[in-house]
Structures are given as structure tokens and as C-alpha cells.
Amino acid sequence: MSLHGNWVKFKGIEKVRGFNRHHITINHIGQIHIGRQMHVDLGRPKSVTLYFEPTLNKIAVEPADPKNPGSIPLIAKTFGAYYIPGSQFIRQNRIHIAGTESFLKPELNHNGILILDLNETIRVTRGRNPGHGWKPDPREKFGER
């Protein structure tokens, strides 16, 4: 097929496949879902501590002792995956998540701390139905995601 004009071919989304792929998502109620392989790479913690860097818009997840104040327990899901109930964390830091976002490049640094960049996510669901009388959040810039 030939097109006239300046058409640019979409080359598809680059997917990382395989056993070592780190799959991490965050949803609108603040649950951070961590895949089995990332949980193993973190050292199989029973709880974590969450940090937020507002100027870089990044979340840090550090393995923690369940007895430490401020630690959040991991909740087991199926097939070795876990989630972090972080609703109070996203509310306190005014993080706005419309639907479920998948982190494109989760980074595990040399200290064993997981760094999640909220600027490098892709929407994996259509988002919440805002309902009648919904007004867009001025903090969210539409069209950039």
C-alpha cells in the first residue's frame, strides 16, 4: 500500500518479555502491584517503606522490617505477586492516578531500593468513570499520557 504525504509508520510498542521482566502497576486507589520477579529481587520483604520525591515525581519503595513504624505490609496475590496498600500515601502526597498505570522502567538501585518514575508510565486501563458533574483535574495535563 502506498500513501501520499508525510505518513510515519507506527513500529509498535516495545515489550520486554521473559522471566526477568519486572511488572509493576499503580491504580487509582493507591495499590502498587509488584510482580513475582520484582518481589524476589527486592529480597522477598514482608513490608516496605514508601518515599515520594515531588520535584522528580518519583516513588521509592524500600524493604523494611514489619516492626518499624511507618512500614506498610505487603498483601499476597496469586502466583507470587504482591500489592502495597498505599491509598493514604497517594492521598498525603497528592498523587493523582486516573486509572491503572504500568511503570515502563522500574529501577532497582544498588542499595536494593525500587525507584518508580510516575513520568514514565503507560495507561493499561481506560480509567475511572467520573460520573455526572465531573470536572478535569487541573494537575493532569490531557494529551501528554
Image (spheres, helix red, strand yellow):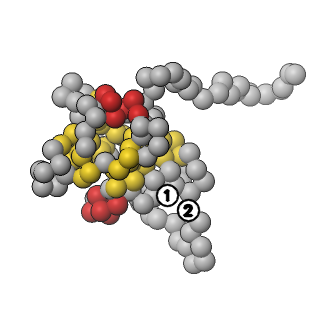
Q: Which residue is mark 1?
A: 98
Direction bottom: furthest residue: 133
What separation in Å lies between label 2 and label 1 (alpha carbons)? 6 Å
- Report the residue at 23% width, 34% height from top: 113
Determine crowd level at label 2: few under 14, some 14-19, many 20+ residues with C-alpha closer than 10 A.
Answer: few
Direction left: furthest residue: 68
Residue 67 % position (x, y): 13, 51
Asked if the residues shown at circle 2 and circle 1 are in contact, with their CB atoms under 8 angstroms apart, the answer is yes
Q: Which residue is mark 2?
A: 128
Residue 120 % position (x, y): 43, 38
Which residue type does callout 2 highlight? Arg
Q: Is residue 118 left or right of residue 15?
A: left
Q: Earlier in the sequence, mark 2 or mark 1?
A: 1
Which residue type does callout 1 highlight? Ala
| Quadrant location, the N terminus | top right
- Report the residue at 34% width, 39% height from top: 116
Residue 6 % position (x, y): 74, 27
Numbered disc 2: secondary structure: loop
Q: 39 above or below 118?
A: above
104 or 19: which is nearer to us?
19
